[in-house]
Amino acid sequence: MVAAAEDSCTARPVDAAPAYNSAPPRHGPVWKVLESVPDPEIPAVSVVDLGIVREASEGGVVLTPTYTGCPATRVIETMVRAALDEAGFVHVPVETTLSPPWTTDWITEEGRQKLRAYGIAPPMPAGRRVVECPQCGSPSTEEISRFGSTPCKALWRCRSCAEPFDLFKCH
């Protein structure tokens, strides 16, 4: 039996945040610096991979945390500030905004691949309800707990290889 995951990715309100691909182009020296800043909770992905960098230029950096109460928000701001300072961008302001709210749609394709390689099932595309094991690729999985190692993940188990894994919650 294959467990069906909550399909909240398909139920976006009309005024929901735009998909990641509609964000400003990700190029320039400030973007390049931020691509090297790892997420403190999932160091295999950068803050750019996760899509929490909304804007990045010499005029400023805008971050949107994965959710309002994310405990890593201040750590991320500090890491971004340190990386910018080290690269000579001491004049670039860093701002955090909650609007529009972050969505898993903003995770880059490279970020999704990195999550999978790290052992975390990335959020499913809209309309897809089967969670594949990031260890062996089996679709025979089940949710163990809606609460995982961090608030943005749920705990799942593969019935084929018996390995537990986190699923990045869709929101």
Image: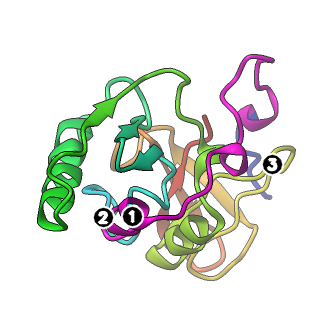
Provide the residue span drawn in magenta: 8-37
Please rate how many residues cluster around mark 1, counting C-alpha atoms within 10 Å: few if below 14, some from 14 to 19, many from 20.
many
Q: What predominant SS class does the magenta segment belong to?
A: loop
Sequence-earlier tag: 2 or 3: 2
Residue 64 shows up from this direction: yes
Reading the image, the residue beneath label 3 is: 129
Answer yes or no: do the residues labelled 3 and 1 have beta carbons within 8 Å? no
Mark whose residue sits in front, 2 or 3:
2
| Residue 31 falls inside the magenta stretch | yes
Residue 70 shows up from this direction: no
**Mark 2: which amino acid?**
Pro
Q: Quadrant of residue 140?
A: bottom right
Q: Residue at x 72, y 32 (%)?
A: 8
Sequence-earlier tag: 2 or 1: 2
The circle drawn on residue 38 is 2
Please rate how many residues cluster around mark 3, counting C-alpha atoms within 10 Å: few if below 14, some from 14 to 19, many from 20.
some
